[in-house]
Amino acid sequence: MAERPRCRVVALISGRGSNLQAILDGVDDGSLPVEMLAVVSNEPGAGGLARAERAGVAPRVVPHRGRPRREFEAELGTLLAELSPDLVVLAGFMRVLGAELVERFRGRMLNIHPSLLPDYRGLDTHARALADGGAEHGVSVHFVTPELDGGPVIAQTRVPVLANDTPEGLAARVLVQEHRLYPLMVRWFATGRLALREERIYLDGLPLARPILFSGDEPCDC
Ligand code: GRF
């Protein structure tokens, strides 16, 4: 049987790139049938660019500072058009993308967000979760829509809040789960198991009634 072509992926980052690394590791060990076309950062000093280079993936910089937003978006849009990926993965990308670009990749752009969405969209999720005194926090992977952190959620992993937790400690435990969940979601997409049609997520051809919820241990490839 002919092998399915590998899913062509571009990652957008702004910082250290630990989620990017989890995906690069999956490509490297063969668990992700993905061809990484490029890693694009809006920050020239992003640590993730060195990770890309070490993995033999083209690092690209599209700076946003000191220029109009539409110019930044136009350059990013042109680069993405040239690369023509099947999937765009936002991995700690700290710019809000305009609706036009997002719409172009509707159903083909994923984001990871450190909270159990719809709770705590935006920044400082860990400190806000602790301040609210809830029993659990976590991470979500969702399809990107023009609404910030508002697109359809595919899956989440819960992380319990501990007594005397700190934002840093909680963030570190959430991050462990991020590194498990994101490669799995990329795998589901790359193997054709995951799709967005209209506003609805389909897994293996069946609509998801609600996000898949994993609890702590290794998210299973069910
Ligand atoms: C992660 O917590 C991710 O969920 C959020 O930004 C952070 C990026 O971390 N969107 P890294 O750059 O992947 O290490």
Image (cartoon, rainbow, N blue to C red):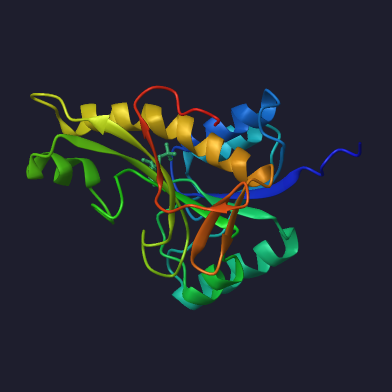
Image location (x, y in percent) of residue 79: 67, 63
Location of the C terminus (image quadrant): top right
Q: Is residue 202 visible?
A: yes
* Image spot of residue 143 (x, y percent): 49, 57
**From what the image shows, is residue 99 above or below residue 81?**
below
The picture places residue 121, in percent across and down from the top left corner, at: 28, 56
Q: Quadrant of the N terminus?
A: top right
> Which residue is rendered at x = 69% and y = 55% of the image?
86
Instruction: Note whether residue 18 is visible.
Output: no
Foreground residue among 193 and 81: 193
Residue 3 image offset from top left, x and y in percent: 86, 38
Horizontal side of residue 132 vs 194, given as left or right? left
Vertical side of 180 occupied by 35: above or below: below
Residue at coordinates 15% horizontally, 46% vertically from top-left? 128
Ligand 1 image-quadrant field = top left
Q: Residue at x 56, y 66 (%)?
A: 106
The answer to which of 32 and 204 lies nearer the viewer is 204
Res. 146 image quadrant: bottom left
Q: Is residue 6 above or below residue 153?
A: above
Q: Nearer the viewer, residue 220 or 17?
A: 220
Which residue lies most toward the right here?
1
Taking 55 as reference, is 75 above or below it? below
Q: Nearer the viewer, residue 203 or 186?
A: 203
